[in-house]
Image: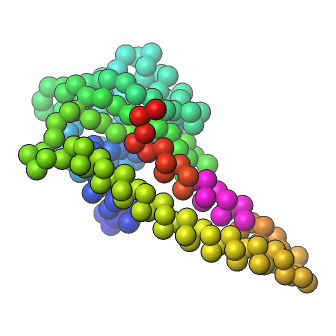
Amino acid sequence: MKRTTADSWVHALPFAIAVVDRSARVVLANTRMERLTGHSEGELIGLALAGELIDLGSDVEAALREAIAAGSADLRFHGSVRRAGEGATATRVLLRSFSVDGEPHALVVLDDGARDAAGEGDEALRETHRRISKLKHGMNNLLMGLFGHIEFLRDTEGLPAPAGARVESLMVQATRLRDAVQQLDTIGEDG
């Protein structure tokens, strides 16, 4: 499977990460998630987060699916990750919702407390925050230029109506992108 830049970035993160759709089924999982669960990426895709990967009570599973579908998931809880061919591993779970083209999804981060011998952990978290900050800075620089060009076109007199409508559509899309970039601030926050 060919990976996009975003996929490659997710795979490089030092935490077990999955993205789930509105029904809480895995649509993307990174290498650390594969190691933690004992499943390959292909095996993880389509599995239900609650029940098939993480043991939770049925009431928590239902609330989880509802929160993701409503786009209001910002949850932290404990569960047991089911390992392929082995027992379960206790883990902390962070789940935060977001949308892709208006469809609700959630980012799931699992932390079993284990750290690599290479000394990952706090340093890895700082590196992740640094990368997110750098990505956000670069995207904001591009957005500044985009908004400047859109305002220039808005101020252009005699712009044909179809072109004017396209400029307004660009403004809507640029605003949505700006809002998505602002959500990067919330990744990894504790509060």
Which of the 4 quarters of the picture holds residue 88? top left
- Left-right relation of 48 to 155: left
| Residue 182 placement (x, y as % from top left) | 56, 52
Question: Residue at the location (24% across, 43% down)?
Answer: 122
Q: Position of residue 129 (x, y in %)?
A: 37, 51
Asked where in the image residue 80 lies, by quadrant, the reply is top left
* Image position of 17 with respect to 163: above or below: above
Colour treatment of the image: rainbow
Question: Residue furthest toward the left?
Answer: 117
- Is residue 34 visible to the viewer in this orientation of the structure? no
Residue 18 colored magenta?
no
Residue at x 51%, y 32% (from the top left corner): 73
Residue at (33, 52) in percent of width and height: 128
Residue 93 is left or right of residue 103, and the answer is: left
Q: Position of residue 1 (x, y in %)?
A: 30, 63
Query: Seen in the image, is 59 located left or right of residue 92?
Result: right
Q: Position of residue 142 (x, y in %)?
A: 56, 71
Q: Which residues are magenta?
A: 171-180
Q: Nearer the viewer, residue 77 or 59?
A: 77
Against 59, residue 3 (above or below) is below
